[in-house]
Amino acid sequence: MSRSTRSLPLRGGLLRAFLVASLLWAGVAYGHGGGSEEGKGTVRAVLDPLPPELSALRVQLRRTLAPQLLVANPTDKPLTVADEQGRTFLRIGPEQTEGDLGAAAFHRSNTLMAPGTIPADASGEPRWTVVEATPNWGWFDLRLRTSSIDVPHQVVDAGERVSVGQWSVPVRLGETETAISGHFEYVPTAKGIAQAQVVDAGALKGQALVRAMPGSARPGLFVSYRGDAPVTLMGAQDEPFLRFSSQGVEANLHSPTWARVAPAGSRSFTEAIDDADVRWAKISNGRSYGWIEPRAAYADTVEDPTRTHVVKRWQIPILMGDKSSRIEGVTRWVPVESVAAN
């Protein structure tokens, strides 16, 4: 499984592991995590500021079904990553990424199914192999997992966000030994939901019905197009995503956004080859289509869960002929009491 993401932005193939997780992701604000009582809150891994010696790197921590570290190394020095026993299993940069296929940690961090499927003591002789042609990589490091963290009852009862532990991934940049580190944070459950709403349909105004589909932790978007010229909705990485026309609705099978939202049984994501960024495939003979829209979702903490307020503003670029426009929307936090009152 290759690894690429353009949001860093990066080159290469670091996205697909994240996409696999994202297909299963549900954007629930304050979702339940490991170590806390059911319905009482969640524990999440948080990335702390990088040490000065790693300031040239680009590092992200993604929270999907499991925490994932994404690293881009633009320096002329290799970044090596060690497992819990001190064995190096990754070399990122300076021109490519190598993995030790003989190290159990490489395989255990390369799948969401770990640690159950691969024993920690399954390592063999080192077998270094180029796994990515760019100095970019992402892995599901088990040291960031929260399932084994025990949150004290007094912390749960206090109902406050608080650090409940630390995590650290030893690395070496060139000859300098250091670490990518962070902490675990307990976040109490907030009672409410995040609701998406379209506030401006842009160039689609008067030519299409554009509506957010609330009522779920994963908000959706519905478009019913009645215009004459084909219109293209762009994806999260500014790639062609969906195309509406009098002939129906098509999806770009090379779109990472389509990979995240494609429903079961539909035409699936295929990797772009030979620089072919677009491969259209019909997904509806009608002119209407609805889909889960991750850009409208909100899965972070809510600073004041007792009042209704906007927690996110989002947009979806659109192309109508040579005219660029965008659908604009907001996502509001609505307390349970306000939902019940409606």
Image (spheres, grey):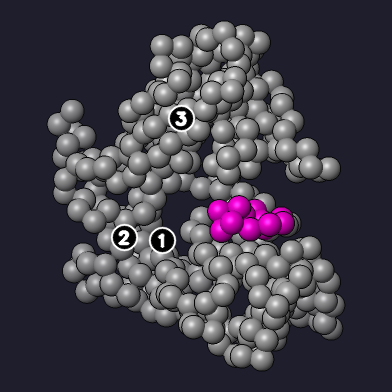
Residue 12 among magenta residues? yes
Which element carries disc 3, helix, strand or loop? strand
Q: Nearer the viewer, mark 3 or mark 2?
A: 3
Seen in the picture, residue 122 relative to 118 is either above or below; the reply is below
Determine which residue is flagged by label 3. 326
Answer with mark 2 or mark 1, whichever residue precedes in sequence. Answer: 1
Q: Amino acid at mark 3?
A: Arg
Q: Earlier in the sequence, mark 3 or mark 2?
A: 2
Q: Is residue 9 rendered to the left or right of residue 27?
A: right
Please tell me which residue is depicted at 66% across the width and 91% down the height of the picture.
175
Q: Say left or right for 121 vs 234.
A: right
Depth order, front residue of 71/123: 71
Per the image, the residue denoted by label 1 is 33
Q: SS for tag 2?
A: strand
Q: Is residue 241 visible?
A: yes
Q: Mark on residue 97?
A: none
In this picture, residue 20 sits left or right of residue 332: right
Label 2: few (<14), some (14–19) or many (≥20) C-alpha neighbours in 10 Å: many
Q: Amino acid at mark 2?
A: Gly
Residue carrying label 2:
41
Q: Position of residue 225 (x, y in %)?
A: 51, 13
What amino acid does circle 1 point to? Gly
- Label 3 crowd bin: few (<14), some (14–19), many (20+), radius 10 Å: some
Q: Are marks 2 and 1 in contact (CB under 8 Å)?
A: yes
Q: Magenta segment range?
A: 4-15
Q: Quadrant of the N terminus?
A: bottom right
